[in-house]
Amino acid sequence: MKNLIIILGSACICASAIAQPAVRIGNMEIIVRKQGQDTTMQVNVLDDPCPPCPPSENETRTRPVRNTYKYHYQSGFGGIGLILPDIGNDNFMTLGGSSLNIDLGSMHRYQLARWFALVGTLQYSYYNYKLYDAAEEADFNAAVLRGGNYSNKDIKKQVFRSHNAGAGAFTRFYFGQPKRYSNDGVFIDLGIQGDWAFSKYYKLKTRSGNKEKIRDDYAFNPFVASYVVRVGMKRFSVYARYRFTDAFNKKPLPLDLPPFTIGVHWL
């Protein structure tokens, strides 16, 4: 008790000598106030010690963990597009209104800045090419139809279809003044997409009732790659896709399928 009185008295004398209103000893704070001829002293017990004690060896120093998912957004998307017919001599003739593409998938967006993001897609893609004169073309007839005799007048319908599992990687640039880490602004996606056709076949129907459904792993390439440009705002976009690899094997089939597709996506 005497030691405590001595410590408190010393603290009061020191505080008065240096005109310091408060003195801390460990977690004890002593406040001295002087009003005229009177001097008052207030003692408070604080939760945090002063000076702070160094961490012991048993205590682990923890750093704040950054939330890596804060700027990661995931959403589903779907869309439909038209395959543009090619009027050149390098591809088979298709009927544009009946040749279409359907996309269904998941989109992951990593918003790195207000105006820039990285986008990845995983999707299912369906392609339907309604052909016009493939059965009458000599190389196609020999490689796919194995020399079958089909006239254009007798053919009722011929299509090439593929069901694909695809993945894409894009860089996204925002324009205007979008809200931070939102998808409200006008944007443009530039990227590449790869597709693996897990099901692909040529189907033929004649007016006389004949039907052919041919799967050929040699004539039909299983993997294709495309450039993709997508321009949109919020949850709507317009896309253009250009396939820069061959859908058909060039050795048995010199002609290929039209490479351009345009359509809309709902994000």
Image (spheres, grey):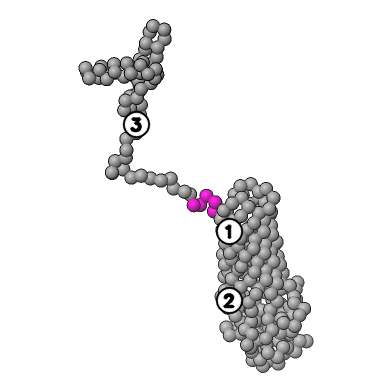
Instruction: Name the residue carrying label 1.
Output: 118
**Closer to us: 189 or 154:** 189
**Closer to us: 267 or 148:** 267
Looking at the rendering, in which quadrant would you find the C terminus? bottom right
Q: Say left or right for 141 vs 72.
A: right
Amino acid at pointer 2:
Phe
Of callouts 2 and 1, which one flags the residue occurring earlier in the amino acid sequence? 1
Q: Secondary structure at mark 2?
A: strand
Residue 143 sits above or below residue 222 on the image: below
Of callouts 3 and 2, which one flags the residue occurring earlier in the amino acid sequence? 3
Amino acid at pointer 3:
Pro
Q: Secondary structure at mark 3?
A: loop
Q: Could you say where residue 1 lies in the image, as x and y percent from the top left?
A: 22, 18
Q: Secondary structure at mark 1?
A: strand
Of callouts 3 and 1, which one flags the residue occurring earlier in the amino acid sequence? 3
The residue at 69%/84% (across/down) is: 255
